[in-house]
Image: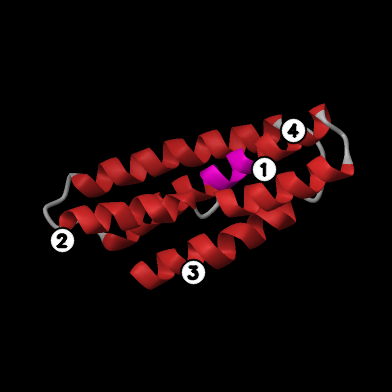
């Protein structure tokens, strides 16, 4: 599971962000999708915590949904920055910093792992 989360954070996350941030468009559909993903994530996690042995598929799906919602929020922020400051430097820096921002949840996960041990 740790390796899957690592690959998601450092490979899939930046790739997903770069693909989704190519187009500038309306931000409300992305915000709506991110909100629905967070609600679904909480619903899945609540369902999994009610059982004695949590279903790891539900837990992983919950983590994946909230992580994709995080990536979508980063895309929304990058689009808003590019709309506010329409320069080529802002376009470049928003893509670089946004792609790096997709890895932030990994460091929270790693910190939690260190505290458990």
Circle 2 is placed at which residue position? 117
Q: Which mark is residue 7?
A: 3
Residue 70: % across, % down: 53, 43
- The answer to whether marks 3 and 4 mark residues whose Cβ atoms lie closer than 8 Å is no
For mark 1, does the 10 Å Cα neighbourhood hold few (<14), some (14 to 19), or many (20 or more) residues? many
Real-space Cα distance between discs 3 and 1?
20 Å
Q: Nearer the viewer, mark 2 or mark 1?
A: 2
Residue at x 30%, y 53% (from the top left corner)? 111
* Colouring chosen for the image of the structure: secondary structure
Real-space Cα distance between discs 2 and 1?
34 Å
What element does badge 2 sit on? loop
Q: Quadrant of residue 117?
A: bottom left
What element does badge 4 sit on? helix
Real-space Cα distance between discs 2 and 3?
22 Å
Task: Magenta stretch: give its range.
Answer: 69-74
Q: Which mark is residue 75?
A: 1
Q: Quadrant of residue 25?
A: top right
Query: Residue 106 in magenta?
Result: no
Q: Which mark is residue 84?
A: none
Residue at x 71%, y 56% (from the top left corner)? 18
Real-space Cα distance between discs 4 and 2?
40 Å
The reply, left or right, for residue 6 in relation to residue 90 is left
Residue 7: % across, % down: 49, 69
Residue 66, placed above or below residue 36? below
């Amino acid at each position: 599971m740790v390796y899957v989360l690592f690959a998601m954070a450092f490979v899939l996350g930046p790739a997903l962000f770069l693909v989704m941030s190519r187009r500038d468009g309306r931000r409300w559909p992305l915000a709506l999708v991110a909100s629905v993903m967070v609600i679904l994530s909480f619903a899945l996690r609540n369902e999994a915590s009610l059982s004695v042995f949590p279903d790891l598929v539900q837990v992983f799906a919950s983590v994946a949904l909230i992580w994709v919602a995080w990536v979508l929020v980063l895309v929304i922020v990058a689009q808003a920055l590019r709309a506010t400051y329409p320069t080529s430097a802002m376009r470049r820096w928003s893509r670089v910093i946004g792609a790096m921002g997709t890895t932030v949840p990994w460091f929270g996960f790693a910190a939690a792992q260190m505290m458990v041990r």
